[in-house]
């Protein structure tokens, strides 16, 4: 049996009735001539699930909470419980699909079973179908989105679904065995807690040291150091108490549009995407009657992979999005400058370092550390934006071509919006996860993002033409 890591356990302790820690997304598929059905999807998952053995395990608590929970094989595992079937009523449009995704992501997963679900959604008006995936964050890496969706996708339409899977669950340990294992581990590794504390101290003081701030102490050191790294953002309608229900909305942008903006105005593809999101947020704020004056900004947590580190190592850059800047090209340049300065100075908050606060001791301290981290996060930023590049070739599920894929990122208490972005085969897919009560106007944000693309493209093109004209005039006069 495997014990949950401090990071994985933290996601369990962070979860409550208003913040289900479900991560996943929705993908749209075009079926082959012979069609696609629920039985075919079940058969595929039944064969491929051997590549993600954690998806046949459930969480078992240790008696009296003397140690972190463990993963145990689910002796009653039933793939048909997890792979479900749904359908949209006519006309089966995208608004109905987005509404379904929001409702499904609002529901906590059943902790007595493996922490994932998958839905085949039929009845889309264009003859396509959708697959919604939903996994607990303790099961997957939220940034890389490595979940069961990874193993069901192929690069060719005629790939085999795989050999028959012969799986026999290991007997579940008894309560006495769990207690014995926990106590034996504590006796065998008495310095584990001290080592973990040193590791956390090292991560936090490195981040704090880059800002010249260091506080001496134990728990006070962790809290004080992190507080020095982050400052309170300006008040915004995104920083508010949220409920249990979610809205989900999608925006699709041709990748060539983003490349064209980058070519005309400079910066990276990621900078251009952030500038588009900033323009969309600016339009949304103005539609709400908010004062969007020069200097107004929204602070975003932008997780990025740390170069040269493992797949689970990410850094969370805090980026001030210049929503108050009226010139779209200037917004892009400010974002590009800010991102470059952050990367060069390496002043970032390591996501693992923050969550590692929960690693000091038994579950009670895990819960305390997670809630301290969540409290700090509410003051640190207004929204999170993850931008993960995807493959630029077609992917398939049992012969069905995937045409779009939208991430769904969970919300923390106090934050009404998270944005997930994936580029895939010529398009940029943007998934907006929002609190249902505080963001009834998420559709306005959708249209504002579309408007921001057109605005930035036009401004960048005009600016490049003007620059060329000036350069030509200078050459002729010379």
Image: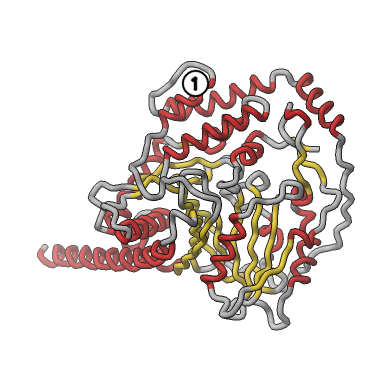
Residue at 76% x, 62% y: name it. 45
The quadrant holding residue 353 is top right
Q: In this view, does 67 lie above or below 233?
A: above
The image position of residue 457, as x and y in percent, is 33, 66
Q: SS of the residue at dot 1?
A: helix
343 to the left or right of 309: left
The figure's colour scheme reads secondary structure
The image position of residue 84, as x and y in percent, is 72, 64
Residue at 71% x, 62% y: name it. 152
Q: Is residue 89 above or below residue 367?
A: below
The image position of residue 223, as x and y in percent, is 48, 26
Residue under label 1: 220
Label 1 Cα neighbours within 10 Å, binned few <14 / some 14-19 / many ≥20: few
Residue at 29% x, 63% y: name it. 460
Which residue is most to the left? 477
The image position of residue 363, as x and y in percent, is 67, 30
């Amino acid at each position: 049996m495997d014990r949950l890591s401090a990071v994985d356990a933290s996601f369990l302790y962070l979860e409550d009735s208003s913040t289900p820690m479900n991560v996943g997304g929705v993908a749209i598929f075009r079926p082959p001539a012979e069609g696609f059905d629920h039985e075919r999807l079940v058969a595929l998952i039944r064969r491929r699930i051997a590549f993600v053995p954690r998806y046949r395990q459930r969480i078992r608590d240790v008696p009296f909470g003397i140690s972190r929970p463990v993963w145990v094989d689910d002796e009653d595992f039933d793939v048909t419980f997890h792979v479900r079937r749904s359908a949209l009523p006519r006309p089966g449009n995208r608004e109905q699909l987005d509404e379904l995704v929001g409702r499904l992501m609002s529901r906590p997963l059943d902790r007595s079973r493996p922490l994932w679900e998958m839905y085949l959604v039929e009845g889309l008006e264009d003859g396509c179908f959708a697959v919604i995936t939903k996994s607990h964050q303790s099961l997957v890496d939220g940034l890389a989105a490595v979940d069961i969706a990874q193993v069901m996708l192929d690069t060719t339409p005629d790939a085999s679904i795989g050999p028959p899977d012969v799986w026999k669950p290991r007997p579940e340990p008894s309560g006495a065995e769990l207690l014995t294992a926990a106590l034996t581990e504590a006796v065998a590794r008495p310095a584990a807690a001290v080592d973990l504390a040193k590791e956390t101290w090292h991560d936090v003081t490195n981040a704090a040291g880059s800002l010249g701030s260091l506080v001496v102490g134990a728990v006070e050191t962790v809290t004080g150091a992190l507080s020095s790294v982050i400052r309170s953002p300006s008040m915004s309608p995104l920083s508010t108490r949220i409920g249990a229900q979610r809205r989900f909305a999608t925006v699709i942008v041709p990748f060539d549009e983003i490349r064209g903006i980058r070519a005309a105005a400079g910066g990276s593809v990621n900078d251009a995407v952030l500038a588009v999101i900033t323009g969309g947020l600016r339009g949304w704020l103005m539609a709400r009657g908010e004062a969007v004056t020069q200097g107004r900004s929204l602070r975003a947590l932008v997780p990025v992979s740390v170069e040269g580190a493992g797949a689970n190592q990410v850094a969370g850059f805090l980026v001030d999005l210049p929503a108050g800047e009226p010139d779209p090209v200037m917004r892009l340049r400010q974002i590009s400058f800010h991102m470059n300065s952050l990367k060069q100075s390496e002043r970032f908050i390591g996501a693992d370092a923050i969550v590692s606060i929960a690693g000091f001791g038994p579950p009670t301290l895990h819960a305390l550390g997670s809630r301290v981290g969540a409290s700090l996060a509410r003051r640190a930023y207004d929204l999170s934006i993850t931008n993960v590049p995807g493959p630029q070739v077609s992917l398939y599920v049992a012969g069905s071509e995937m045409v779009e894929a939208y991430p769904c990122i969970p919300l923390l208490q106090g934050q009404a919006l998270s944005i997930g972005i994936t580029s895939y085969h010529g398009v940029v897919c943007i998934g907006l996860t929002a609190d249902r009560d505080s963001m009834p106007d998420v559709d306005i944000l959708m249209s504002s993002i579309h408007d921001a693309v057109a605005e930035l493209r036009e401004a960048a093109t005009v600016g490049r033409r003007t620059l060329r004209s000036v350069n030509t005039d200078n050459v002729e006069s010379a």
